[in-house]
Image (cartoon, grey):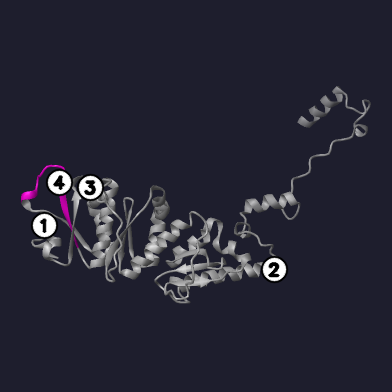
Amino acid sequence: MKWLFQQLEGPVYVDGWEDRTDITVVDVPSDCIGYITGARRATLGLMEEEWGTLMFFMSKSEDKGRGKGGNEKLAILGSERARRGSELKVMSGVETKNPGEFTKNIREKTSDKKGFDTDRLIFRDDELSYALGKEGATRKKLEHASGAILQYVGHCAFIAGDLKQRSRCTEFIKWLLAQRRGSVTVGDVSRREDCTEVHIPDNCKGWVTGNRGSELRRMEQETGTYMFMALDSRGDERLLIFSADAGNKMGNQGRMGAERLVSEMVQDKLRDDERGGRGRGRSDSRSRSPSRKRARSGSRGGGGRRRSPSPRRRSPSRRRSPSRRRSPSRRRSRSRSGRR
């Protein structure tokens, strides 16, 4: 609290921070400070709220007014996991502003430590965008399902957590990238604590996965899981649901929540087939808009609004003969009488 209120009066510096175990310090280039801080400290505030940390730039009064090109020390206080999550987010932001600041000559790293540690995985250029997803959705999905901290700093994936979390997250990333090249084979999963295996009838697979996997993506987002169709050792395809969170049958989160959603979709499809459905795709089963209903019903001639019939023309035989046509004088007299 003292450091928090000191920021209102002037520069804050934590003496002896190098010997403390509850603080992490990141060197931020001076030209990135505004980008990391945000207007009225908005960006830092969001990171603090996300990770439950306290963050502020440390500087001594004699450091004020130093030239450009130097670094400012950003202090991050909190638990080990929270500090690491905040630190990696700051590193990602700095790397976006100044490419190479943290990743120049960086190499992959895998730790065997059972406790909390950080691994690194290098992406190729064409892999990063796929592993990131739209607005970071794929990265968040892998992070949530694995239980690890997953952050992309340039072309490097930083994976933080205990050994199980890090191994799980690395495995998820490799499976994700393998799906770009075709079907993925995952052997026996019966002994895994983070996986639920679901066998889906052949006539329901397209219904459950959706167009380009859209239904799987929707269920992943709702339940915080990672789901994909994979082949077993015999070449049979089944749905695998991965998450460190088992969830519960009545809830909407975890593997049980995802399994329940899949089961409901399968039952809906089977009931639809029993009623005489012809295996229609998901897009065909959705109700059409009123305008499309009217257009289709009108073309089939049933139930919709029909076009009014065009006026019938008189046949030549029914037209007035010259003798029956009104003379000009008669037409004039009728028009005069109508004006009276």
Label 1 – label 4 distance at C-alpha: 18 Å
Residue 108 magenta: no
**Amino acid found under the numbered disc labelled 4:** Gly
Q: Which residue is mark 2?
A: 275
- As helix, strand or loop, the secondary structure at mark 2 comes to loop
**Amino acid found under the numbered disc labelled 3:** Cys
Question: Of the residues tagged 2 and 4, which is closer to the observer?
Answer: 4
Circles 1 and 3, Cβ within 8 Å, touching? The answer is no
Q: Nearer the viewer, residue 188 or 192?
A: 188
Question: Of the residues tagged 1 and 4, which is closer to the observer?
Answer: 4
Q: Mark 1 or mark 3: which comes first in sequence?
A: 1
- As helix, strand or loop, the secondary structure at mark 3 comes to helix
Q: Is residue 256 among the parts visible in the rendering?
A: yes
Q: Which residue is mark 1?
A: 12
Q: Nearer the viewer, residue 110 or 158?
A: 110
Q: Return the x and y of residue 289 as percentages of the image width and height.
A: 61, 54
Q: Mark 3 or mark 4: which comes first in sequence?
A: 3
Q: Mark 1 or mark 2: which comes first in sequence?
A: 1
Q: Mark 1 or mark 4: which comes first in sequence?
A: 1
Q: Which residue is mark 4?
A: 70
Residue range (magenta):
62-76
Residue 89 placement: quadrant: bottom left
Q: Which residue is mark 3?
A: 32
**Amino acid found under the numbered disc labelled 1:** Val
Q: Return the x and y of residue 236 as percentages of the image width and height.
A: 57, 67
Is 250 on the left-hand or right-hand side of 315? left
**Amino acid found under the numbered disc labelled 2:** Arg
Label 2 – label 4 distance at C-alpha: 72 Å
- As helix, strand or loop, the secondary structure at mark 1 comes to loop
